[in-house]
Image: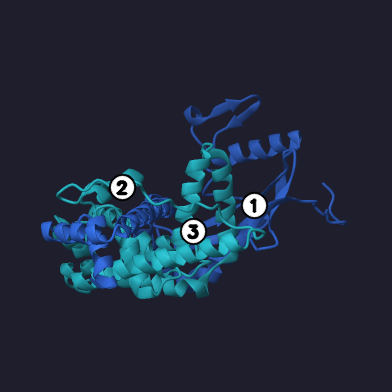
Chain colours: A blue, B cyan
Amino acid sequence: MTGVNRDILITRVLDGEATPEDWAAFRAMAARDQAVWADLADAQQDRADLAAAIADAIAVADRVEAPVHHHAGERLNARIRTGVAWLGWAAAAMVAVVGFTGRFGAVSSPGTEADTQQAGLFSISSPEDAMRLYLDKGLEAGSVLGELPDRVMLSSTPAADGNGYTVVYLRQIVERHHVDSLFQLGEDEIGQPVVVPMVPKRAKNVTY
Amino acid sequence: MTEIEGEYSDDGLLPLVAAAISRDPEAIRLLWDRQRRWVAALLLAYKPREADLEDLLQEVAMAFVRKIGELREPEAFKPWLRSVSINAARLAGRKQTTARKHSREFRLMVERSTERPVASDVVLAKREEGRRLLDLVTQLPEAYREPLLLRCLHGMSYREISRIVGLPETTIETRIARGRRMLRERAAGQEAVGRTEPAMPGPKNTKKTPPTMPPTMPPTGKTSEEVCDDRS
């Protein structure tokens, strides 16, 4: 029997694909050459070890979902981008003006009396009030250093009623917290990522 | 592991593919869930060494959702998904983002340090041997890597592999047999080098000893299949 036939026979036996004729041929081969058993055992162990390693490696697949909603959102965003691209500069200017004056009519509309909640001595009747309370309390406690004046615009669309625009933007709040130690990601001598302690440098012209 | 019997079979696949082609979100989701493991194994065969498997899978999943509606023949689904996956793997080397890779590796490092229970020396040695073999498989010629890795997925038969790869079953069988032979020779070669260079650091010596008794041989020859089941 040639080497290739021997390997194929072992592979069929190993993979459960052997026919009764294959088994007969395998037994006959093993009767002539006992080393066939050792080859089969080695192949069986390799296969088991390899299967375990592959199962480990591909376990990440269970975390990867088909991004169906993301795709739908992407298509919608593309349509919106196409429709309002020419309005971009105007909306950006509006955000800048609003940012400067600090007035957000759309989000600070007064609530009814029933909507108003009390938080200590503060009256919370809108999201803007809640944000103001968070900023004030944070500043008082030292966990909030302030809010950056610039808003980062993410999108702009004409308002549904035809008057003005709806803008989506980021507000940037700077916080301060105490941690016991700092680490950063570095590389060891063979290029593997390692976590190493970090000594932070403080900018000379910044005071908190 | 959450594998099920016949997970990779084509039973009931075509209606699901047809529904996915017509952009039914639930069908798309279900179809991807049934394919992602073999896609991951395929990516292992083709991805550049430094590319992150999860990143690649995300890219394939994205392309799958975006392009499934363009597929004309449901019968061509698996070869089509294979092409999408191989293209993603081949592009990966050029698009690797170091920052993303590092942040993911950092996260995995934390996960490993917090989640994994303490394993015995035997389990660790087996795991190390498996990783060494997987590393060797990725160095085999391309034609042998893919069928060898796909065959190690529970339930994937020669027939199913041949449908994905688009080659006759006999060719798949020959490649698996030759691939295993090459793998054993390379593993033995590595072990021999390890023995002659004791001062060099390397993987644990997990050299196998020949069995004193032959393995059990049932008439149907299914014993080895169950070996894979136990590990998966």
> In the visual, does B101 lie left or right of B176?
right
Q: Are marks 1 and 2 in contact (CB under 8 Å)?
A: no
Residue B132's disc is 3
Q: Secondary structure at mark 2?
A: helix
Disc 1 residue type? Answer: Gln
Choose mark 3 or mark 1, whichever is in front: 3
Looking at the image, the residue that sits furthest to the left is A20
> In the visual, does B132 lie left or right of B31?
right
Where residue A27 sits, quadrant-wise, is bottom left
Residue that appears at 16% across and 71% down: B73
- Category of crowding for the residue at label 1, using alpha-carbon neighbours closer than 10 angstroms: few (below 14), some (14–19), many (at least 20): few
Subunit that carries the residue with mark 1: A
Choose mark 1 or mark 2, whichever is in front: 2
Q: Nearer the viewer, residue B3 or A137?
A: B3
Disc 2 residue type? Answer: Val
Q: Which residue is mark 2?
A: B227
Disc 3 residue type? Answer: Arg
Residue that appears at 14% across and 55% down: B12
Subunit that carries the residue with mark 2: B
Q: Which residue is mark 1?
A: A172
Q: Nearer the viewer, residue B3 or A10?
A: A10
